[in-house]
Image (cartoon, rainbow, N blue to C red):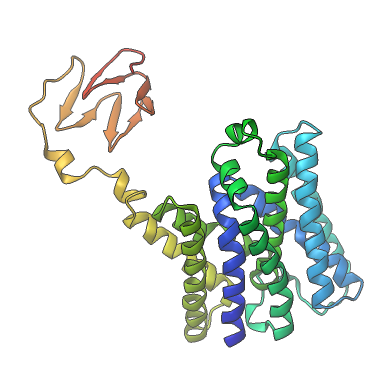
């Protein structure tokens, strides 16, 4: 249990620092692909009779090759990023399954590769996992201004002289290294959850990038503690318990955060205020809630119209606090 707690902290540091960029850039599918393609590298290492070190090295090589392959097909091959990810993801994952299925017996079961075995982590495993974690932390801190600029506005960053292509490829490699850490401890299937779930909760709580990383790491550590205690007392699988604890924390954050569900729902003052406003023709209105072709909840219009910024498109448009059937309005 002590080693598992240390392992969870190592995973949380790597996943927390990189996962924020995964969420901000919408690269969750990339993280999923990299996590799954590591199975091919680990399978090759196991077939060759390698131990934990060689298996980690093989998984890391497969992950980095996946990141570079996606970048090459996207930049040079002019394929869409999701298309390139899907091709490499399916091919390498299938290769890993075939290699494992062809072996009669191996020191590590397929189940351990898929869902991990964090309770079986030895001190040598922890040292091996700490090395890519330190590399990830040093690279993120060294290139934090460029990563931040590229994550929020790559076009302006490119015009400003930031090597956007280099930073984007580097970010893919960082994702690969972070998933290598998570893969050895929580498995292929759950690695993405540790990368994305705590980071999503952090993004809901703050707008400061460095604080996002810190909160994401702390949520990852807390979910490790809760998940391990739940697995111990209720005889549950440790890796899935940790991931489920992280998901529950994210859901709770979404419900209570002003940037989550609480911010999307109308407040009591919003519902009760200004009920006597004049009604535009063709609309039935209660307080500031509009019923008909669209429904306004918070600052978002739902139904037959879609609000983008302060402009509503579709069957209705907003002019001040009034709605009409015009096509658009500033």
Front one among 184 and 98: 184
Residue 12 at x, y = what percent?
57, 68
Instruction: Please say if 290 is above or below 162.
Output: above
Q: Nearer the viewer, residue 71 or 133?
A: 133
- The residue nearer to you, when weighing 149 against 238, is 149
The percent position of residue 225, horizontal first and vertical second, equals: 49, 78
Left or right: 301 in relation to 213 = left
Image location of residue 8, percent across then percent down: 58, 74
Q: Nearer the viewer, residue 284 or 193?
A: 193
224 up-or-down from 30: above or below: below
Residue furthest toward the left?
Answer: 276
Dividing the picture into quarters, in which one does residue 189 lie?
Answer: bottom right
Q: Is residue 254 left or right of residue 83?
A: left
Image height of 30 relative to 63, above or below: above
Q: How many marks?
A: 0
Q: Residue furthest right?
A: 48
Determine the residue positioned at 32% across, 51% down.
258
Direction from residue 146 to residue 260 in the image, left or right: left
The answer to whether residue 114 is seen in the rendering is no
Q: Seen in the image, is 312 located left or right of residue 1?
A: left
Q: Residue at x 51, y 85 (%)?
A: 232
Query: The N terminus is located in which quarter?
Result: bottom right
Q: Residue at x 86, y 69 (%)?
A: 45
């Amino acid at each position: 249990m002590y080693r598992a707690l240390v392992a969870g902290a190592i995973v949380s540091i790597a996943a927390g620092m990189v996962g924020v960029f995964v969420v901000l850039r919408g690269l969750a599918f990339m993280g999923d692909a990299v996590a799954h393609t590591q199975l091919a590298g680990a399978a090759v290492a196991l077939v060759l009779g390698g131990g934990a070190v060689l298996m980690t090295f093989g998984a890391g090589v497969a992950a980095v090759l996946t990141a570079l392959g996606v970048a090459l097909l996207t930049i040079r091959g002019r394929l869409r990023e999701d298309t390139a990810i899907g091709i490499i993801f399916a091919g390498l994952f299938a290769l890993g399954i075939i290699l494992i299925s062809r072996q009669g017996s191996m020191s590590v079961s397929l189940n351990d590769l898929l869902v991990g075995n964090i309770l079986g982590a030895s001190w040598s495993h922890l040292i091996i996992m700490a090395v890519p974690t330190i590399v990830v932390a040093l690279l993120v801190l060294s290139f934090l201004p460029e990563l931040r600029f590229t994550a929020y506005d790559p076009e302006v960053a490119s015009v400003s002289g930031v090597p956007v292509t280099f930073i984007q490829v580097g970010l893919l490699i960082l994702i690969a290294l972070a998933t290598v850490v998570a893969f050895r401890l929580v498995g292929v299937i759950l690695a993405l959850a540790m990368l994305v779930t705590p980071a999503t909760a952090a993004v809901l709580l703050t707008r400061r990038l460095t604080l996002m990383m810190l909160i994401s790491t702390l949520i990852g550590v807390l979910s490790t503690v809760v998940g391990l205690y739940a697995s111990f007392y209720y005889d549950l699988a440790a890796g899935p318990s940790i991931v489920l604890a992280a998901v529950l924390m994210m859901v709770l954050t979404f419900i209570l955060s002003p940037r989550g569900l609480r911010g999307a729902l109308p407040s009591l003052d919003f519902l009760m205020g200004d009920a006597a406003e004049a009604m535009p023709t063709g609309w039935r209105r209660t307080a500031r809630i509009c019923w008909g072709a669209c429904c306004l909840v918070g600052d978002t219009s739902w139904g037959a119209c879609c609000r983008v910024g302060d402009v509503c498109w579709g069957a209705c448009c907003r002019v001040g606090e009034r709605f009409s059937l015009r096509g658009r309005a500033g």
